[in-house]
Image (cartoon, helix red, strand yellow):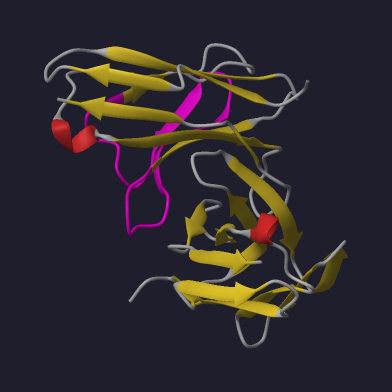
Amino acid sequence: NAGVTQTPKFQVLKTGQSMTLQCAQDMNHEYMSWYRQDPGMGLRLIHYSVGAGITDQGEVPNGYNVSRSTTEDFPLRLLSAAPSQTSVYFCASSYGGHGTSYGYTFGSGTRLTVV
Amino acid sequence: KNEVEQSPQNLTAQEGEFITINCSYSVGISALHWLQQHPGGGIVSLFMLSSGKKKHGRLIATINIQEKHSSLHITASHPRDSAVYICAVRSYNTDKLIFGTGTRLQVFP
């Protein structure tokens, strides 16, 4: 089925470990983004990309890296995990374009716990 | 003050009731989205609005651009409607989504 595929669904890390959350979409969407969801707060933008080879920081980028080598994939890397990065992470994609209004498709989420 | 405010934060209803969830925003937007998130589940897009009104089954979404306000209505509510409903706006200036904190709805039989 077409959509956004996120892996893994669950992950437990020790403080200081690194890992990559995978995100792939097969809809040829230009715009891809990563969000984190914490209790009592709206989703917050970590990093986003408006096309292959182009990435930019969102609201809460510290401790995370991204790359966009292909249109389909947008992995999120945690460089040195900290307990403050315990959260649920969502990847989303959309047709891009400044000022345009296209629907978003979200992945199923990754629940990350850092101990 | 958050740029996107939702009310109420929590809502309980009896099956069959008419439900309204409100969203107010303070930025210029290119679109407003209503999203649904079931417990432990992913996020599903319900509506995207830039003007007027949209209807899908028992769900109706309206937006008033001048007043910077949107409402999501659920007619004849059902326990399977229990979820968190999230309002998000796409900022015209930054092209980024800004999310409300969500409204948790519980519908009892």
Please, is residue B98 above or below residue B7 in the view? Answer: above
**Image quarter hosting the N terminus of chain B:** bottom left
Residue A26 in percent (x, y) is at 72, 19
Let me know if residue B87 is in the magenta part: no
Relative depth, front residue between B103 and A63: B103
Asked if B14 appears above or below A54 in the picture, the reply is: below
**Residue B92 locus on image (x, y percent):** 59, 61
Question: Measuring 38% from the left and 36% from the top, which residue is drawn there?
Answer: A88
Choose top left, top right, bottom left or bottom right for residue A1: top right
Question: Can residue B55 be seen from the camera position used here?
Answer: yes
Quadrant for the C terminus of chain B in the image: bottom right
User: What is the x, y in percent for residue B90?
Assistant: 58, 58
- Residue B46 drawn at (x, y percent): 72, 54
How many dots with numbers?
Answer: 0
Q: Which residues are magenta?
A: A37-64
Q: Nearer the viewer, residue B29 or A85?
A: A85
The residue lying at 32 percent from left, 27 percent from top is: A112
- The image shows residue A14, relative to residue B35, as above or below, that is above
Front residue (pair A48, B53): B53
- Using residue A46 as the reference point, say whether residue A106 is left or right of it: right
Q: Residue at x 70, y 71 (%)?
A: B15
The single residue placed furthest to the front in the displayed view is B109
